[in-house]
Amino acid sequence: MTDSRLPERYLNDRRINRLSAEHFRSYVMATLWSVSNRTDGVLTDQDLTLIPGFSMTAPAAFEAAELWAGRSGEWTIEDFAATQTSRHDLETLDNARRADRDKKRRQRAERKPDGPTFTPSPGDDPGDVSRGTAQDRTGQARQGQAEYLEPSGLDETETVNEQTGEVTDAAPRYAYVTENGKTRRVRAA
């Protein structure tokens, strides 16, 4: 992306401040156009017709204010080199960005594994059931009543996490087994 600058010194530059609003807009638009088209502040008479909102009376005002210098169908913005990024610098930046993108692409290709990048860990599978959260949900494919397995009471080794409601057991006595779409609690061996 190419950006043009409006230097702070334009606030006190008599040449700029004496321009009419129409000519000031033309000056700014010509500067923007020159930067974006990388002309280094050189504009031809044909270029002026391509600049949006440009007043064709502006070049004479710019020349009188010593903002532009003219020569046979070509205009040069006088302070362009001091206030804007040159074509050479913009091309250097473009090349550096391109080299960085290519380097990053190569690094990603070298790190990319051959197989799938996702390896599920225990608890990631929606079918996994944690103690205290076991619910058997009834859907269209399942007939019958849902069976909720809540412990009837906590024994001395079970605790409840107040934030999550998860029941934990230091020495589990029960395990949950799913058979034929139903989950049941059995004594652990």
Image (spheres, grey):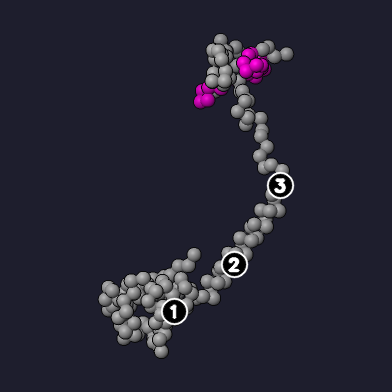
Q: Residues within 10 Å of mark 1 (few under 14, many from 20)?
A: many
Question: Total label count?
Answer: 3
Check the image and report above or below for 14 versus 157. below
Does 60 sit left or right of 157 as displayed?
Answer: left
Quadrant (top left, top right, bottom left, bottom right) of the C terminus: top right
Left or right of 162? Residue 105 is right
The amino acid type of the residue labelled 2 equals Ala
Badge 3 marks a residue whose secondary structure is loop
Which amino acid lies under the numbered mark 1 shown in the image of this protein?
A: Gly
Check disc 3 and report the residue beneath it: 113
Q: Report the span colored magenta.
A: 162-185
Q: In this view, does 27 lie above or below 112?
A: below
Q: Where is residue 36 in the image (x, y as percent from the top left)?
A: 46, 71
View extreme (bottom): residue: 72
Q: What residue type is labelled 3?
A: Pro
Please name whichever residue, 109 or 93, is drawn nearer the observer in this view of the structure. 109
Q: Dividing the picture into quarters, in which one does residue 174 lie?
A: top right
Reading the image, the residue beneath label 1 is 41
Q: Nearer the viewer, mark 2 or mark 3?
A: 3
Residue under pointer 2: 96
Q: Which of marks 1 and 2 is nearer the N terminus?
A: 1
Q: Which residue is drawn at 64% across and 57% down?
A: 105
* Residue 64 appears in view: yes
CA–CA distance between discs 3 and 1?
A: 50 Å
Could you say whether the residue bearing mark 1 is in a helix, strand or loop?
Answer: loop
For residue 107, above or below residue 150: below
- Residue shown at 34%/74% (left/top)? 54
In terms of image quadrants, where is residue 33? Answer: bottom left
Callout in the foreground (1, 2): 1
